[in-house]
Image (cartoon, helix red, strand yellow):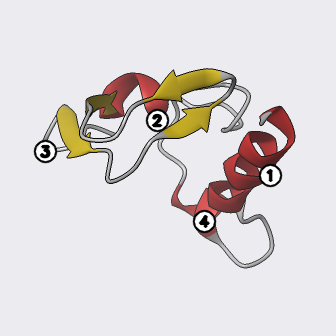
């Protein structure tokens, strides 16, 4: 429920577009883990501890990949 690190940073290796926004090469990108893990479009009942969301039957951890593909 609470990641040991709240924010991670990555550097763009090449210029790209993410959901219609251009990210230049060498840009520093920050990702907030707490808000990302609580996005209701990606997770059912995101504030509830539910390890079964990762089970083979549910695979909620794969649902956001499909949402990202369709939004680009």
Residue holding disc 2: 37
Q: CA distance from mark 3 to mark 2?
A: 13 Å
Disc nearer the start of the sequence (4/1): 4
Residue for point 60% across, 33% down? 18
Disc nearer the start of the sequence (2/1): 2
Disc nearer the start of the sequence (1/3): 3
Point out the frontmost of discs 4 and 1.
Answer: 1
1 and 35: which is toward the camera: 35
Disc nearer the start of the sequence (2/4): 2
The x and y percentages for residue 70 are 86, 41
Numbered mark located on residue 15 in the image = none
Residue holding disc 4: 54
Numbered mark located on residue 4 in the image = 3
Q: CA distance from mark 2 to mark 4?
A: 13 Å
Residue for point 47% across, 43% down? 49
Secondary structure category for the residue under label 1: helix
Point out the frontmost of discs 2 and 1.
Answer: 1
Q: Quadrant of residue 41?
A: top right
Residues packed near mark 1 inside 10 Å, few (<14), some (14 to 19) or many (20 plus): few
Residue holding disc 1: 66
Secondary structure category for the residue under label 3: loop
The x and y percentages for residue 21 are 59, 20
* 6 left or right of 35 in image: left
Residues packed near mark 2 inside 10 Å, few (<14), some (14 to 19) or many (20 plus): some
């Amino acid at each position: 429920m609470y990641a040991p690190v709240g924010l991670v940073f990555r550097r763009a290796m090449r210029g790209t577009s993410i959901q219609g926004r251009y990210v230049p090469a060498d840009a520093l990108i920050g990702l907030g883990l707490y808000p990302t893990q609580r996005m209701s479009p990606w997770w059912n009942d995101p504030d509830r501890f539910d390890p079964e969301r990762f089970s083979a039957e549910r695979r909620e951890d794969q649902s956001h990949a499909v949402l990202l593909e369709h939004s680009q």
